[in-house]
Image (cartoon, rainbow, N blue to C red):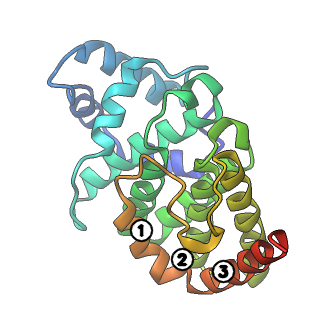
Amino acid sequence: MNLDQFPLWGLLKENITVDMLQSIAIADYGYDSEEHFSALKNIYDNSETPATLKLEPKEVLSLVSWSKYLDDESEELYKVLFCVFILLVSSVDEESSNRLEGRSDKLIIGLDCAEKLGRATLECFYDFVKAINSRISLALVEEDLLYLRLDEYICSQMTNQAPSVFLELQEKLVDDEIAVAEIFEYHIEYHADVFKYTFYNQKVELWKAYYSTYCAEYERYRVEKLCHLFSVKNH
């Protein structure tokens, strides 16, 4: 996929250096570092991801995406965001998507890094998530569709989008939750916990922190809507 279509990519290229690519390439204890670096440099130079993301550089991208970072460590924040960006872009490819573990974690890590890097980065991340969501299908990502949409909703709140944007996303989020619940044949009340649908979320506390700050209005809408649907379905 051509990456120049995403403003976030332009911002990342301005802040990612060759030295930073090399530090990503050695993340797996230096194992196959030359192959990883070559793959990363190819993406960087050509602003293009391969049709299917291979192990080189997927392995080191995934490892670095889990790196710890502080609010003022801009270089580390950009590195983590760079890795998250490449991994999420690959979610639109079926084979790469099936091999991408912890997508919901990548979503909230990316959001957290973007928020710490400032308003311009956050707005670019919001545009990126919107663009990815427009190309993703339920069959491709299953439960992560809900968290892709939730990430977009939180970003829309953080970037002060129009109320009509919030309302449209609220409706889509409820539809997504119902669809995901049906995939996994949940027979409990839908409104119990919006984070119960993922089995891989290691960053659930970070998700909940953002959710409690930016999703109070949505949670009220969600519970009211799902309680009504649940009661109608069972009568």
Residue 158 badge: 2
State whether residue 193 is above or below residue 43: below
Q: Disc 2 versus disc 3: distance between alpha carbons?
A: 22 Å
Q: Secondary structure at mark 1?
A: helix
* Residue found at x 63% / y 55%: 186
Left or right: 216 with respect to 11?
right
Image position, residue 206 (x, y; %): 36, 66
Q: Amino acid under label 2?
A: Met
| Along the viewing direction, whichever of 29 and 224 lies nearer the viewer | 224
State whether residue 149 is above or below residue 46: below
| Along the viewing direction, whichever of 14 and 214 lies nearer the viewer | 214
| Along the viewing direction, whichever of 154 and 203 lies nearer the viewer | 203
Q: Disc 3 versus disc 1: distance between alpha carbons?
A: 28 Å
Q: Amino acid under label 1?
A: Glu
Residue located beneath label 1 in the image: 115
Image position, residue 45 (x, y; %): 46, 26
* Residue found at x 39% / y 56%: 109
Q: Quadrant of the rendered structure where residue 141 is?
A: top right
Q: Secondary structure at mark 3?
A: helix
Q: Disc 1 versus disc 2: distance between alpha carbons?
A: 9 Å
State whether residue 149 is above or below residue 42: below
Q: Earlier in the sequence, mark 3 or mark 1?
A: 1
Residue located beneath label 3 in the image: 223
Q: Are marks 1 and 2 in contact (CB under 8 Å)?
A: yes
Category of crowding for the residue at label 1, using alpha-carbon neighbours closer than 10 angstroms: few (below 14), some (14–19), many (at least 20): some
| Along the viewing direction, whichever of 219 and 209 lies nearer the viewer | 219
State whether residue 57 is above or below residue 111: above
Left or right: 57 with respect to 98?
left
Quarter the C terminus occupies: bottom right
Q: Amino acid under label 3?
A: Val
